[in-house]
Image: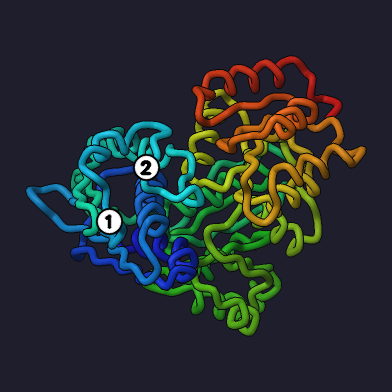
Amino acid sequence: METAFAEVLETLRPLADKKSQTLSQHAENGLNVRADATRFKQVLMNLVGNAIKFSPEGGDIGLAACLIDGKVCVEVRDTGPGIPLEEQKRIFEKFYRLRQSEKSTEGTGLGLAITQKLVELHGGELGLESQPGHGSRFYFSLPMAPAPRERPAQETGSVSKTSGSPRILVIEDDPATAQLIELQLISSGYEVVVCDQPHRAAEIAEGLQPSAITLDLLMKPTDGWEVLVQLKRDPRTASIPVIVITIADQPAMGAILGADDYLVKPVDKMDLLAAMERCLGTRVVQPARSILVVEDDAAAREFITELLTAQGHTVTTAADGAQARAQVGTALPKLVILDLLLPKLSGFELLAEWRASPRTADLPVFVLTSKDLSREEETYLRAHAERLFHKQQPWQEALASEVRRVVSSGQMENA
């Protein structure tokens, strides 16, 4: 519980710092919930992200957990403007936006709907207490889980069947994070072994002799700094490239102690693969091209990803225009689902760039936006994008159907 709280707050702290807000956490010792770790963190990310978004400059956001009647009660409190009573019943509806919200913070209206669904899938219920002018409190309860049992010191993850694949040792004691890194690497052609007991990491690395190692820093009972020193001091492992993956933003210290690369969580798959290629000096053959979802709203991005993944599509994501430009520049996706209102580089600018380049002129692009389009903008999009969907209208089934139709038609083979 404390680890999940810490990772969520560290991930969102830069957003809070921009508004001089204070983030705090408190959890009773020994609390564990019976829930999927990744989805649990997603719930926290959505609730804390909303609190940051709607709280004023200098506001306070608190994340807490306690044991009540055998269940773990989790709450997120904020000092935002509060929610009028007449809107509290509608706030969990898809695409509903608070009337008092400024346009710059409206988002898609999907975040709370997805959050409520995730809580319900785990047997809980998402509740709200709020008064205008006195902030809001979102809360839910989940069954208490026993403390996790120790797993074997070395576990072999799924292995790619590609002959001669580089073997990567993932040293990570958080199961959800380890699984994410493992899946990202396996899907890109690597063989992966996971070590979740850092006190045995150096011993396992010496016996395994992997092509590279990914290493978390904040682990118990032996932290990653100590593991890094052990690896680089031992002649048997000193030459193995080590990529640090952590929430601690201290790349200079990592370099001093011998880290070959340094990534700060949350880590995008493309960044991880780029670091791996830098360390290994080679590129692993990638699987079939994916669908790229370009969307800055985390809840909407997750919703679209789940919608497409459920249909068997491979999906990658970009949270702003610059990331999308870089990913398309590195490898052409099958299809792009593009928001227009993006940080750093707008969807209009990306579309214009892609259509002007011979390499991407035929790249299929579906635009999905909440922007009120002028007649000229809509005419431009219908001329330069394959499909145009408005978030204010029902779009999920139509989008899924069109993606399925376009992908299966073979239309994108020449993209």
Q: Position of residue 334 (x, y in %)?
A: 74, 31
Check disc 1 and report the residue beneath it.
76
Q: Position of residue 196 (x, y in %)?
A: 44, 59
Q: Position of residue 284 (x, y in %)?
A: 76, 47
Which of the pair 176/234 is nearer the observer?
176
Residue 4 visible in image: yes
Give the residue furthest to the right.
358
Which of the pair 364/158 is nearer the observer?
364
Which residue sits at x=51%, y=62%? Answer: 171
Amino acid type indicated by mark 2: Arg
Give the residue furthest to the front.
375
**Which of the image's four quarters has the C terminus?**
top right
Q: Which mark is residue 99?
A: 2
Which residue sits at x=53%, y=62%? Answer: 265
Q: Using residue 196 as the reference point, say whether residue 80 is left or right of it.
A: left
Dot 1: few (<14), some (14–19), or many (≥20) neighbours within 10 Å?
A: many
Q: Using residue 316 as the reference point, say whether residue 383 is left or right of it.
A: right
Count numbered badges in the picture: 2
Q: Which mark is residue 267?
A: none
Q: Secondary structure at mark 1?
A: strand
| Quarter residue 355 falls in | top right
| Quarter residue 239 falls in | bottom right
Residue 185 visible in image: no
Rendered view: 347 above or below 412? below
Kindly report the distance in space between the C-alpha atoms of the residues bearing marks 1 and 2.
22 Å
Amino acid type indicated by mark 1: Val
Q: Earlier in the sequence, mark 1 or mark 2?
A: 1
Q: Secondary structure at mark 2?
A: loop
